Amino acid sequence: MIRKRLTRYLASGLLLLLPLAGCAAEPVELQASTAEKLQSAVLGITEASADGDFTEAQSLLTAMQANLRTAAAAGQVSAERSASIQAAINLVTADLTVQIEDAAVAAEAAAEAAAEAAALSVEQNAENAKEAAENAKEAAEDARDAATKAAEDAKENREECQDDKDRVKAGACN
């Protein structure tokens, strides 16, 4: 929506830059060469804005404003025409300032969201590591219990074997 409004202001600025047809005896409101330079600047500003490069658009707008002042001082633009072009520049400058501020707020919000996501990821990784450690501890305890049971079973089997004299004589109870 704001881009549409910005484009509308820029288009209005273009219309203001078009030289007026008139008699040669009348004073020139805007010389053709100056109009071309200003129209070229408007095109650059429009393209930068459409690309979302509001800082570049603002820089180009500042340069356009300086060129307008220079042209007005040189008599290439009438005072009335210069004032109307400056009014359009002021509107576009205000919109660009809002766009730049909104972009800064959005970038800050994105950075905060990324930091929160990273913190949650670290927290989740810590929880996963804790759970893995608990699982490893349980597995170690199970292995120890199994080894203890195997040792007890082996001891019991050996005792049973030694109780059986025939097996002892056969050398089966080593």
Image: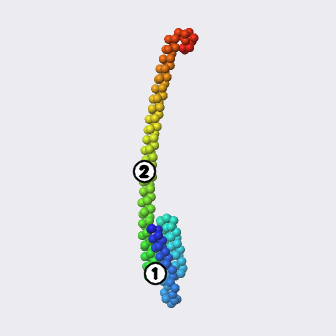
Q: From this viewpoint, which residue is outermost toward the right?
A: 170
Give the mark count.
2
Q: Residues within 10 Å of mark 1 (few under 14, many from 20)?
A: some
Question: As shown in the figure, which amino acid type bears the numbered disc 1?
Answer: Arg
Residue 158 seen in render: yes
Quadrant occupied by the C terminus = top right
Quadrant occupied by the N terminus = bottom left
Give the secondary structure at mark 2.
Answer: helix
Residue occupying image coordinates x 45% and y 52%: 114
Residue 58 seen in render: no
In the image, residue 119 lies at what x, y percent?
43, 48
User: Rounded to the nearest whole Å, what is the CA distance between mark 1 and mark 2?
Assistant: 53 Å
In the image, residue 152 lies at what x, y percent?
47, 20
> Which of label 1 and label 2 is nearer to you?
2
- State the mark number for residue 116: 2
Nearest the camera: 33 or 112? 112
Give the secondary structure at mark 1.
Answer: helix
Q: In the picture, residue 80 is in which quadrant?
A: bottom left
In the image, residue 139 lies at what x, y percent?
47, 31
The residue at which mark 1 appears reads as: 81
In the image, residue 34 lies at what x, y percent?
52, 79
Question: As shown in the figure, which amino acid type bears the numbered disc 2?
Answer: Glu
Q: Is residue 64 above or below residue 169?
A: below
Nearest the camera: 113 or 84? 113
Residue occupying image coordinates x 56% and y 14%: 172
Q: In the picture, residue 169 is in which quadrant?
A: top right
Sequence order check, earlier mark of 1 and 2: 1
Q: From this viewpoint, which residue is outermost toward the bottom?
A: 25
Residue occupying image coordinates x 43% and y 44%: 123
